[in-house]
Amino acid sequence: MGWIDYVAPQLYWEIGHKLAPYEVLVDWWGKHTYGRHCYIGLGIYRAGTNTAWKDKTQIPRQIKLLRNTPNIQGMIFYSSNTFEKNPNGWNDSLQNHYNKFPAIPPGMKWLDTSRPQLPHITSIGLQKTDSTYLVQGEFLQNYQHTKKIVVYMYADDKKKILTPEKIYHFTVSGKNFILSFPFNPTHKTKAFGLTVVSNTNVESKQQIFHWKE
């Protein structure tokens, strides 16, 4: 009926469970999202409770399954308090692999399809001493509806680098901002692209900045 924006099914059973196998349920939910987002609830609190949940690969395998299932946008962990104990070493797996880099959640375009406006850039500095850019700017309007600024690095004037470690995310906390991020001094052309993301995760058009030495 279009009454909700996302579902978060609590799939707290292990892969291969005799009555409610995780892999079957993930597949079902992926086929019944009806155009809305689906974030799978993962039961990390169950670590160590039985043989299946003593297996260090249980959560990594669940993550791989949901990421390979169409129409699944992400995951939610229950409960966050469990991470204080680093169950089965999963904290390390998430920090070093599965969630090593931030990502832009998919936009909820049924709420708002309009792209946010880019800010005004007041100055750009190239710090050769530590190989960083320093960018200052301000939002001329509606910064309250903007969630983050995203910077994409370029290898040259045209080729955008899309590897996660070359995409930088900055949270918007006010009208004025300062961004600091590294560049590759071996590139003859220093270039980067800048976008902003709205509160409903709609990304703006990209503005490219570059100059040659």
Image: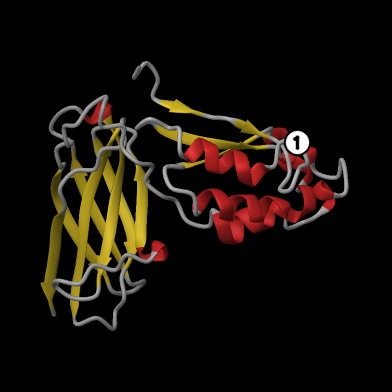
Identify whether 212 is placed above or below 191: below
Q: Residue at x 34, y 60 (%)?
A: 181
Q: How many marks?
A: 1
- Which residue is more in the foreground, 16 or 161? 16
Circle 1 residues within 10 Å: few <14, some 14–19, many ≥20: few
Q: In the drawing, does residue 127 fall left or right of residue 38?
A: left
Indicate the quadrant containing the C terminus: top left, top right, bottom left or bottom right: bottom left
Indicate the quadrant containing the N terminus: top left, top right, bottom left or bottom right: top left
Q: Position of residue 130 (x, y in %)?
A: 36, 71
Q: Position of residue 72 (x, y in %)?
A: 46, 42
- Which residue is more in the foreground, 112 or 14? 14
Q: In the drawing, does residue 24 fall left or right of residue 189?
A: right
**Mark 1 highlights which residue?**
19
- Which residue is more in the foreground, 210 or 178? 210
Residue 153 lies in what quarter of the image? Answer: bottom left
Q: Residue at x 73, y 44 (%)?
A: 14
Q: Position of residue 70 (x, y in %)?
A: 43, 47
Determine whether the residue tagged by mark 1 lies in a helix, strand or loop: loop
- Which residue is more in the foreground, 204 or 23? 23
Q: In the drawing, does residue 189 fall left or right of residue 152?
A: left
Q: How is the image coloured?
A: secondary structure
Identify whether 137 is placed above or below 98: above
Amino acid type of the residue that numbered disc 1 sits on in the rendered structure: Leu
Q: Residue at x 57, y 30 (%)?
A: 9
Identify whether 16 is placed above or below 111: below
Q: Position of residue 42 (x, y in %)?
A: 64, 39
Q: In the drawing, does residue 63 fall left or right of residue 2?
A: right
Q: Residue at x 35, y 41 (%)?
A: 106
